[in-house]
Image: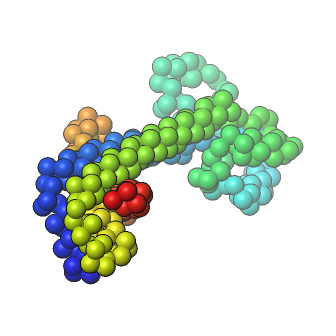
Amino acid sequence: MSLVMREALLGFRRAPVLSALSVTTIAFALFVVGLFSLVALNLQAALDRVGERVEVVMYLRRGTPVEATMLAMDDIQRFPEVARVEFVTEEEALLRAREELTEFRDIFDEFHDNPLPASLQVHLLPEHRNATTVAVVADRLRGFRFAEDVRYGGDWVENLDRLRGIAGGVGLLVGLAFAMTAVIIIGTTIRMTVLQRNREIQIMRLVGATDGFIRLPFLLEGALKGALGGLAAVGLNYAALMAVSRVLADSRFFTLLEAGAIVLFGTALGFLASAVAVRRHLRRV
């Protein structure tokens, strides 16, 4: 194994410019993949924060007994989609309206009677904050006889779901495109290395070396180039995030596991691209 490792490292020394160019190009390709992944992660985190505001509000008829309201809260809390239920009295609703709608504070002061009804605010579990589930929960709440009205902002929730889908789809397509670019680049550099060492490979075959023995250093070389490119890409992504975080607060970076996945992804790409290139070109040597 030490011989194979030495041969792989010698590949870097034999063609330092080509090796540096391939690692740099791989790093740039994976950097762009990582950059779009960071955008997708931060966009998803922002959408999740917005999604925390997804709730279903059931307005109660005036005069609804407190006992009936408490029983309804217990029933709703048992819904599998529900995280918690909050009871907002008429007085609390008016107080919140005065605090949040400051431009209408004078209008609220002119009312002799409180015009706002009591309500039950139903907060959903994260995995159920989507348009379909929200509509189902709203239909169930309308079944309570003392429900005056049920609101949940259907159009707003649908737009949120659409944004999530677009963010995930664009990130996946861009990631696949640049992953293919990285495969082509690694494969090309390995093919050039194989052709450069044509005479050496012929001599190895004459002394009885198998194709597997000849192929292994190239595979290891491609994996090393992919790993180095992945490490450089993670560093570039971190530098880019630090530059952006001065303008955009609450930006998040990859976790250690996610950063390791990028390095492993680069290693796997390098290995697979090398395997394809070496298998194809050893037949011609």
In which quadrant of the rendered view does residue 197 lie?
A: bottom left
Would residue 253 be seen by someone viewing this image from the given angle? no
| Image quarter hosting the N terminus | bottom left
Total count of labels: 0
| Residue nearest the viewer, comparing 208 with 20 | 208
Residue 182: percent from left, percent from top: 36, 47
Task: Examine the rendered structure and indicate whether residue 100 appears above or below residue 263.
Answer: above
In which quadrant of the rendered view does residue 93 lie?
A: top right
Residue 37: percent from left, percent from top: 40, 46
User: For this view, does 174 lie left or right of residue 120?
Assistant: left
User: For this view, does 212 lie left or right of residue 112?
Assistant: left
| Image quarter hosting the C terminus | bottom left
Task: Examine the rendered structure and indicate whether residue 188 appears above or below residue 117.
Answer: below
Residue 91: percent from left, percent from top: 61, 38
Residue 212: percent from left, percent from top: 37, 73
Task: Examine the rendered structure and indicate whether residue 196 appears above or below residue 33.
Answer: below
Kindly identify the residue that appears in the image at 42 percent across and 57 percent down.
280
| Residue nearest the viewer, comparing 106 with 191 | 191
